[in-house]
Amino acid sequence: MWMTTVGPCDLPPQHPRRSRHDREILALTLPAFGALIAEPLFLMADSAIVGHLGTAQLAGLGIAAALLTTLVNVFVFLAYATTAAVARRIGAGDRRAAVQQGIDGIWLALLLSVPIVAVAVPLAPALCHLFGASATAAPYAITYLRISALGIPAMLSVLAATGCCAGSRTPAPRCWSRSPASRSTCC
């Protein structure tokens, strides 16, 4: 009698069971992912537009973009810290304190951004030089950095607000679809 063995190709494909939490996880992770990739996507769009102006302009954008991304990414802790603080309060059943933690995170983002902008705007020439801007690219890098630095408060606030939404397990689209007066209280 012949013995046959079943190989891995002969077995029916096994699909992992979908959990009832998969949709909830996806609803929480997609907005967080969007918040984290927003700045690189904006810079990519800027590069496509500025690339038509010339090489020096594009080089200036590259240097300013690297500086701006570095300045903002240093503060990614705002998203993670706000997530943890809000989730801890939600877990304790204290929704009011969770909302306050979210608001505090956004205020912290705004307070941290003030000295960053105050330093980045006047020190733009020195910062661009530290990042190796050539004499032809430096003026464009300085201009782009000075203008873009004014958006740092909004960028850091978005990080904190994303943390608030994630900590409260509220998907960001539902969070942001509320009235303008209550958008900062995603919880």
Image (spheres, helix red, strand yellow):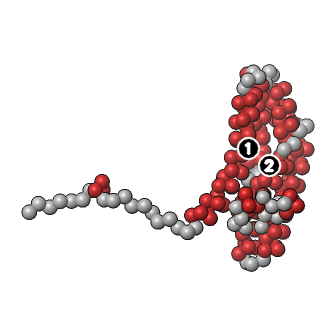
Indicate the quadrant where residue 32 lies.
bottom right
Q: At x 80% / y 61%, what residue is drawn?
A: 178
120 versus 170 height, above or below:
above
User: Mark 2, residues whose alpha carbon is within 10 Å: few (<14), some, or many (≥20)?
Assistant: many
Indicate the quadrant where residue 164 lies.
bottom right
Q: Secondary structure at mark 1?
A: helix
Measured from the top left, where is residue 168 in percent x and y? 73, 67
What amino acid is at disc 2?
Answer: Met
> Which residue of the protein is positioned furthest toward the left in this rendering?
1
Q: Which residue is mark 2?
A: 155
Work out whether residue 7 or residue 11 is closer to the camera in this orientation and state it.
Answer: 11
What amino acid is at disc 1?
Answer: Glu
Indicate the quadrant where residue 151 lies.
top right
Q: At x 58% / y 67%, what residue is drawn?
A: 21
Q: Which residue is mark 1?
A: 39
Q: Secondary structure at mark 2?
A: helix
- Residue 78 visible in the current orientation: no
Distance from the alpha carbon under mark 1 to that under mark 2: 8 Å
Work out whether residue 4 or residue 153 is closer to the camera in this orientation and state it.
Answer: 4
| Quadrant where the image shows the N terminus | bottom left
Measured from the top left, where is residue 94 in percent x and y? 78, 77
Work out whether residue 119 or residue 111 is closer to the camera in this orientation and state it.
Answer: 111
Q: At x 78% / y 58%, what residue is drawn?
A: 177
- Residue 171 visible in the current orientation: yes
User: Mark 1, residues whose alpha carbon is within 10 Å: few (<14), some, or many (≥20)?
Assistant: some
Q: At x 43% / y 61%, what residue is drawn?
A: 15
Measured from the top left, where is residue 9 in percent x and y? 30, 54
Q: Earlier in the sequence, mark 1 or mark 2?
A: 1
